[in-house]
Amino acid sequence: MAIYNLGSINMDHFYEVDHLPVSGETLASLSYRVGLGGKGANQSIAAALSGAQVRHIGAIGAEGEWCKARLSDAGVDTDHVVILSTATGHANICVDTAGENLIILYSGANAQISEAQIDKALREAGSDDYLVLQNETGLTFEAAQMARARGAFVVYSAAPFDATRAIQMLPVVDLLVVNEVEAQQLSKALGTAIEDIDVPNLLITRGSNGAEWRVGATGERISVDAFTVDPVDTTGAGDCFIGNTVAALDQGMTIADAMRFGAAASAIQVTRHGTADAMPSRAEVEAFLAEKGSD
């Protein structure tokens, strides 16, 4: 069993500020640091640290070779991460004292991944495997078709949200992941109720209010509460939740247990600064769950 992840790889530039800037404002940063990020890299590291076999499909520029090394150090297979002449993708992230953030993205090499690269990476995928997708790379529709042809389970996070792209993806996904706002935006674009979005499985994340998984065929709803913590940086929390939840599913957990595992992981992650660098290990998540018991 393996998790294939067609995902972005970014260099994250963090600026700590006492409040998020508004239009026309010049704001001095209290601190600066750089780390590995990108929704794809975040999810791959989260899943790998929880014990899953993860194969990342991505692209970087020459100046981003340390990003590939960081993925490898976390246990991610990077054989299908290519180095291109385009600059590595990056994000400028402002984080305020309450842990809220404002992010500006540059796609860079993430937008240059080829169909041939994806096809080569997925040749060994099968019915026991997962493909994880999000909107920070191109060719998600094509990748989903390739994976489904091989019997793999396709997980698609419709973020950053684009209604046209999300609608295109609906026929080729097994699990659609959206947050509350994205669910409402997609519902409006489709002209239908959220409950009637036609996908086999729908996972709606609600931040501090937990998450809900809806099974399309039966109408079953599986909910998990978020754990109460004092966050310092919420950047990457959704990626942490998705990576750990999919990894737990890949390792045989039930949907309910996998979501609880993901919720615990993201609860730990938001108490740390950073994105990929803040992802917890499986041992940390298990210890957190043991401490919480049945709460």
Image (cartoon, grey):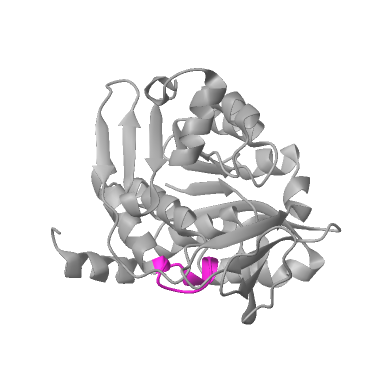
Q: Position of residue 67 (x, y in %)?
A: 66, 68
Quarter of the image for residue 135 reads: top right
Q: Is residue 120 above or below residue 168?
A: below
Q: Position of residue 62 (x, y in %)?
A: 80, 66
The residue lying at 28 percent from left, 63 percent from top is 228
Res 31 seen here: yes
The residue lying at 63 percent from left, 45 percent from top is 121
Image quadrant in which the C terminus is located: bottom left
Query: Which span of residues is magenta-colored?
Result: 269-279
Q: Nearer the viewer, residue 189 or 176?
A: 189
Left or right of 287 on screen, residue 189: right
Q: Is residue 2 magenta?
A: no
Q: Nearer the viewer, residue 182 or 138?
A: 182
Q: Position of residue 188 (x, y in %)?
A: 52, 24
Quarter of the image for residue 269 reads: bottom left
The residue lying at 60 percent from left, 40 percent from top is 122
Q: Nearer the viewer, residue 257 or 162?
A: 162
Res 153 seen here: no
Q: Nearer the viewer, residue 112 or 95?
A: 95
The residue lying at 44 percent from left, 22 percent from top is 197
